[in-house]
Each structure stands twice: as structure tokens, then as C-alpha cells.
Amino acid sequence: MRYLCVLITVFVCGLASAEPPPASTSTLRGTVTDPSAAVVPGAVVVVQSGTESRQVTTDGKGQYILNQVTAGNYTVRVTAKGFAPFEVEGYTISDSSVLDVQLTIATEAQTLTVQEEANQLTTEPSSNASAIVLREKDLEALSGDPDELAQQLQALAGPGAGPEGGEVLVDGFSGGNLPPKASIREVRINANPFSPEYDRPGFGRIEILTKPGSDHIRGQAFFQFNNESLNSRSPLFAGSTLPPYQQRFFGFNLGGPIKK
């Protein structure tokens, strides 16, 4: 019986000595600074080894400490806003390890693409922000009377460069008479014509482009009528009835080949 008790005691002691020793824990501490050696508060320090991961944030002095870290090899990452991430792999943590980190300023890459066919500046009236281009439907709203048509175009052009108002060019020539509205193909009113081909830069340049000729004879006749019944009453007129007034305006234009 005495030998049996001794044997059991020896067996229990053997089992107790066969258990693995508890794993040792370590501490990781350090300071995070910038390139000028100034401390970086609020930086995030992460240590990871397999499934084990620990995280801590630096204090106002840029210092951090991780307690009770199992000794071994870890990947240490440090991130902070405005700085490039820092990472070191295989860092051995044992006992009381110290890892000071100096972060670098993050850089942003910008790509500038230069295209050969970029938009270019032009002095064309149609490309000018202050230009007015009148074509078929716009011209129909204008008057057929040459005098009234000239006044309407001058009003659209605004103040001219001289006392005679805006410069009027017909098919590129100045000093000519205003053509009939039926023969006008396009009117360009450029309020700021600073182009080297113009004889005088200024305001109110009116360019009139006429329709090209054809092989057929074409014409147009028009008639305008106006009297006192069609006019509004002036507030300064004291009479009971409007004075008699009547206007009749006849006109026609004919175009075609000179010789067929």
C-alpha cells in the first residue's frame, strides 16, 4: 500500500512538470515624430502577427506604449493624417522593446495632359461672347424699309466708335448702301471687333452678307402702309383726334444672271 501511494505521487508530479510554461509578455513603446523631429500626436500604431493584432494611439507628446504583448516577430504599421504610412515587417518584440518612428510627408502625384488639338482663341464674330448673328428667321422680324432696317441694326449694335454709329460693311466693303432685306443672307453684329484685319477697332461693327447669285431671275415686291389709325396716341397731344397721317411705301428687288 505504501509503494502504491508513492507511485501515484510520482505520476502526478510528472504530469505537473509536463505542462508548457506560460508565455512571456513584453512591452513595446516609442515616440512618433515628423521630419523636423516634432512629435506627432494622434498617430495610430498597429502591431500584428497572424491573427493577433493590437492598436494604440500616440498621446499629446507623440508617445505610445503597448503592454502585455506576447514576445515574437510582428509587423508594425504607423499611420497619421498628412504623412506617408510607415511599416516594418519582422520586428522582434521581447522584454521592453523601444521603436521610435519618424514619418515622412505624404506626396500627391498630379498628372497634366497636354492635348495638341486644344481650343484656340479666335477673332471670328460667331465665337465672340458679345456677337449677335442674325439669319433667316431672325431677319424676318426686321423691317423691310431700308431706313428702319438700318436703325434697327444700329440699335442692336449699340454705341459706335465714332459719331456716325457702328461701322457697316456689306460683303466686306464699307461705304455702300444697305441692300434690300430679301437679298441679305446673314447679319453679324460684333460689339468688340479687335482683329488685325479690321481697319478700325471699336464697337458696333455690323457685317452684312448677301445671298449668292443664281442662274434664275428672282424678284420680290413689297408694300408698307401706315396711317393715324394705326399709331398710338401721344400723351402730350391735347387734341381730341389725331392729325391726318398716311404713309405708303412701295418697293421691289430683282436679281439674276447678267447674261445666260
Image (spheres, grey):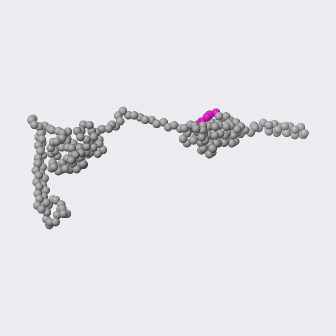
Q: Is residue 182 visible?
A: no
Residue drawn at point x = 9 percent, y = 35 percent: 259
- Left or right, 39 with reference to 231: right
Q: Residue 43 lies in what quarter of the image?
A: top right
Question: Of helix, strand and loop, which mostly describes the magenta segment?
Answer: strand
Residue 99 horizontal/vertical position (percent): 65, 37
Residue at far front of view = 163
Viewer-closest of 45 and 161:
161
- Magenta residues span 85-90
Residue drawn at point x = 51 percent, y = 37 percent: 107
Quadrant in which the N terminus appears: top right
Quadrant in which the C terminus appears: top left
Residue 58 horizontal/vertical position (percent): 62, 43
Q: Residue 64 lies in what quarter of the image?
A: top right
Q: Is residue 246 visible?
A: yes
- Left or right, 215 with reference to 61: left
Q: Residue 225 lies in what quarter of the image?
A: bottom left
Residue 70 horizontal/vertical position (percent): 69, 39
Residue drawn at point x = 23 percent, y = 40 percent: 200
Viewer-closest of 201 and 57:
201
Residue drawn at point x = 61 percent, y = 37 percent: 101
Viewer-closest of 92 and 172:
172
Residue at far bottom of view = 240
Residue 115 horizontal/vertical position (percent): 38, 34
Q: Is residue 196 magenta-colored?
A: no
Viewer-closest of 202 and 130:
202
How many numbered marks, from 0 up? 0
Q: Is residue 136 above or below residue 11?
A: below
- Left or right, 208 with reference to 54: left
- Left or right, 229 with reference to 61: left
Residue at far left of view = 259
